Amino acid sequence: MPLTHHLSPVQVAEILRVHQSTVKRWVDDGTIPASKTPGGHRKIALADLLRLVRERKLPSVSVDLSVVERYSSGLDLAAQPLDTLRSNLRDAMSANYPTRVHQLLLRCFQAGMTIEQMGDDLIQPVMEEIGKAWVSGQTDVAQEHLGTSYLHAALIDLRNRLLPIDGIPRPVALGACPEGDFYSLGNLLVELLLLQNGWQVINIGPNTPAASLAHMMERQQAKLVWLTCSYLQDPERFVNECNQLHHKATELGTQLFLGGQALTTEVRRKLHYHWIGESLSQFSLAAKRLLPLSGANPQ
């Protein structure tokens, strides 16, 4: 099917699991935009249909994802419903197809999906599903590790595509995972997000002592330092070291950003920071507010 992907009411009815007369009524009253062929047949753009589904502007529909897949081959992935993308990513990871994982994320990126959308709306929900399957015994921890490695490899490729090559000075963002935390996927997503928004990024990575991060922060004159915390080896020690890091950052005029599932409400009450959040989208908004202060020119 060509990239225009125009469907008949019968095909749309199959996707939405409704009668074709319902589709025709929605076309006639303007709920679904459509054109007509010279012969008078209604044609509906798949991209328009998927947008309406994504924005929940169609009443009482249940999308058949397998039919969407059949009709959407070659369509920009960013236009597909998130449920479809998540299903495709989960299936590729579960079936041990790293190339398919890579291609899916790359096509989403090339179609205009931002890193925060990719992380918050696609990768995180899929990883949560796999994690729940592991806890319930439906899958093995090895599968979770393999899936994470496939995502990591794909994101490294995107990172290389985002690295600036123009030599323009940019504000420095420095980040890591705390000592004892070896889960690097969230940290890598933060790195990509900052590169996307025009920062020079130094990602030290997992298992980084707070003293090393503080030393690097001063040495690199970082405007932003972040910690993604998926696991805290010793919460009390982390609180003490993080608060010392905050004090040092404040002295240097550096902003300390914190995030991650290990930062429970109890831990947060004891922490000092300049910003803390729940999602990449929130992180992106907070980081963007710092760019004018440093005179940066986002890419």
Image (cartoon, grey):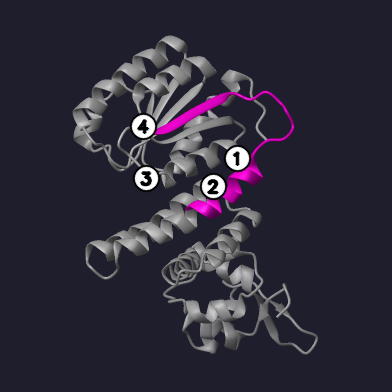
**Disc assigned to residue 276:** 4
Per the image, the residue denoted by label 3 is: 183
Q: Residues within 10 Å of mark 1 (few under 14, many from 20)?
A: many
**Disc assigned to residue 39:** none
Spatial CA distance of label 4 from label 3 is 19 Å
Q: Which residues are magenta?
A: 152-177
Q: For the residue marked with disc 3, what is the amino acid?
A: Tyr
Apparent side of residue 99 relative to residue 266 in the rendered image (left or right): right
Apparent side of residue 73 relative to residue 17 in the rendered image (left or right): right
Nearer the viewer's eye, disc 4 or disc 1? 1
Spatial CA distance of label 4 from label 2 is 19 Å
- Figure quadrant of residue 282: top left
Q: For the residue marked with disc 2, what is the amino acid?
A: Ile
* Residues marked 3 and 2 touching at CB (< 8 Å): no
Sequence-first disc among 3 and 2: 2
Q: Nearer the viewer, residue 67 or 185?
A: 185
Sequence-first disc among 4 and 2: 2
Residue 231 makes an appearance in the image:
yes
SS category of the residue bearing label 4 = strand
- Figure quadrant of residue 163: top right
Residue at 31% of width from left, 23% of height from top? Answer: 242
Q: Residues within 10 Å of mark 3 (few under 14, many from 20)?
A: some
**Disc assigned to residue 115:** 2
Asked if residue 81 is among those painted magenta in the image, a careful observer would answer no
* Residues marked 1 and 2 touching at CB (< 8 Å): yes
13 over 122 or under it: above or below: below
Per the image, the residue denoted by label 1 is: 196
